[in-house]
Image (cartoon, grey):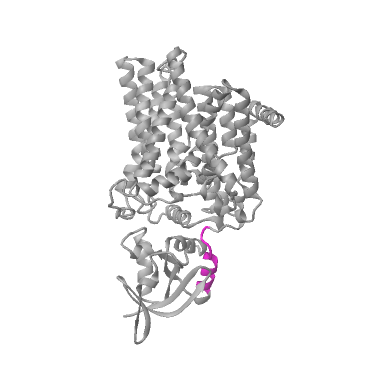
Amino acid sequence: MKYLTSIFFSITDSIYLSKFRWLIFTLFTLLFRLPYYLFSEKRMHGDEAFLWLSNQNNLDGYDVTLHPFNHDYLGMTDFLFTIPFLPFFGNSGIANQLGLTLVYLLSAFLLVSISENVFSKSVGKLTFFLTLLPSSFIMIMSATYHGGHFTASVIGLMAIYFIFQIDSQKGNRNYLYSILVGFFFLLSYYTSHLNVLMLLVGFPIFFYQLVSIFKFNLKVLSGLILALAFGCIFGYVPEILGKIYRVVEPTHNKDVTVPGFMFAQNNLFVLLKYGIESISGILSHPYMRYYGFQVNKNLGLFIKIFAYINLLGFVVGFLTFRLVKGLKDKTIKISDNRLIFFIFYVILLGGNCLALVAISKNVDDFGIRYLMPVAIFSPIMVAWAWTELASISLILQRIVVTVFFLLTLGGYITGYTKPALYTFEGSPGSKEVYAYFEEKKIHFSFSNHWLAYNLIKLSGQKHLSSPAIELMGGMNYPGLHKKVLDASKKEKIAFAQMIGVIPAWFDFIKKDNLGQYIDIPEGKYRILEESQIDRWKIYIVESIP
């Protein structure tokens, strides 16, 4: 182990100290994400195809929106990062992936810069490698065009970066930094309202930072706070415009009326089973099982224990001990940036975990994406804890770091050598269903969220499909729904539903003396033909006058 750790640290030192380190980082990141680029269209699931349609409408100037149709808690910021690639790839899966790669590279630069500025080069080095070989949670979140949760956290990270750029020696630049703090915080909120957690903790930290640097110099403080307010107003402009100009009145999730903590038991279970590992940064996130990243029971238990020790033992427990000791010994001041950053992280960690438990919905393993606001800071905190550990025992620190990276690297090697990573389909059977519709000359359909938007994308909008939510009292895109509904009165259409998923068209099938028909609030449809394509049950129907 000693020989192995020596080799590992020699390699990491050489790369980190190289003047080409960011070029190496970029090339490795591009190579690492190659499967995501090559299979970007096949991997695209319903949410991504839904956002593709939002982007396409904006490009076409049709139903232009600053929110993805009725999802008024999400913005269109992700689309900005795809713009450089549109001339080469058009509005496509690979353009989305390359845009997300830009966001990820930005996050890595910010994390390393904060580590070096607030802590030390040693922390910066470990942060560099924790972002070079990211946890599976960050990998999936930064490689899925899924509503801006990752991008919102990175934009919030930019605000935090500028908070710690404020310094008494920087004069008028502090006003610019304050403007940027406000702008990026509010832009992150527009991108995903989930990031309000970072704002709730970040703004008090900003004020704490100002007072700790400028004491009670009211002239400077009032000027910087006014600069912050100006930045907030500017950053909130997209949100205001999105509320004024709407394609549709938002209804998504508006039917959730249950009180907070209604699903606390289930959500706490999800947090403890998946959340701690995901925040800790180790490769064990449940998303990865879909791509073949599987471990046996014993190794899985070891990873879970290691993750708990890493986050609760090293990051929270050990750093608390070190900071309290430093305050007692007067080697750390109350205004120390390290202490301020730690307070920020711990409050955000507790708040984010509490929010996941309290949320008014029954979350599953995919629900841990709501932990993104705190998870984005994990590389810094883990690197800092490991660096502090070296002051106690250099051997122990090197063993911990080496084991962590070997587990992560081993996990990726295992996953990347399995066919599941390359054969995964975001919407299984969508190509086959579309081919069937082409054969039957069906140009309109009602289906579910996971199929509808993929059919629209596959057909280049020649086939229009409205998802089931439109028939269940919700509304994603009424304009699309109206087109399908109007067409259903004039020509044969199809109903398609994934077997085993509710709501299903099976629930609306009735029978009379002429045979079976589907009875929904919008009308009655006689079933002319039924078949099964992959996991989809298909009904070809015509309207009953």
Q: Nearer the viewer, residue 338 or 218?
A: 338
Which x, y percent locates residue 43? Answer: 55, 55
Q: Which residues are magenta?
A: 426-438
Determine whether 468 is above or below 114 in the image.
below
Residue furthest front as drawn: 298
Question: Can you say which quadrant of the picture contains the N terminus?
Answer: top right
- Residue at 59% x, 46% y is 298
Magenta stretch holds residue 436 = yes
How many numbered markers are drawn? Answer: 0
Q: Visible in this render: residue 304? A: yes
Magenta stretch holds residue 69 = no
Residue furthest top as drawn: 330
Which x, y percent locates residue 438? Answer: 52, 72
Residue 481 is drawn in which quadrant? bottom left
Q: Quick check: 284 left or right of 341?
A: right
Q: Quick check: 488 left or right of 310?
A: left
Q: Quick check: 168 left or right of 222?
A: right
Which x, y percent locates residue 51? Answer: 45, 53
- Residue at 62% x, 49% y is 415
Question: Can you say which quadrant of the picture contains the C terminus?
Answer: bottom left
The main secondary structure of the magenta stretch is helix
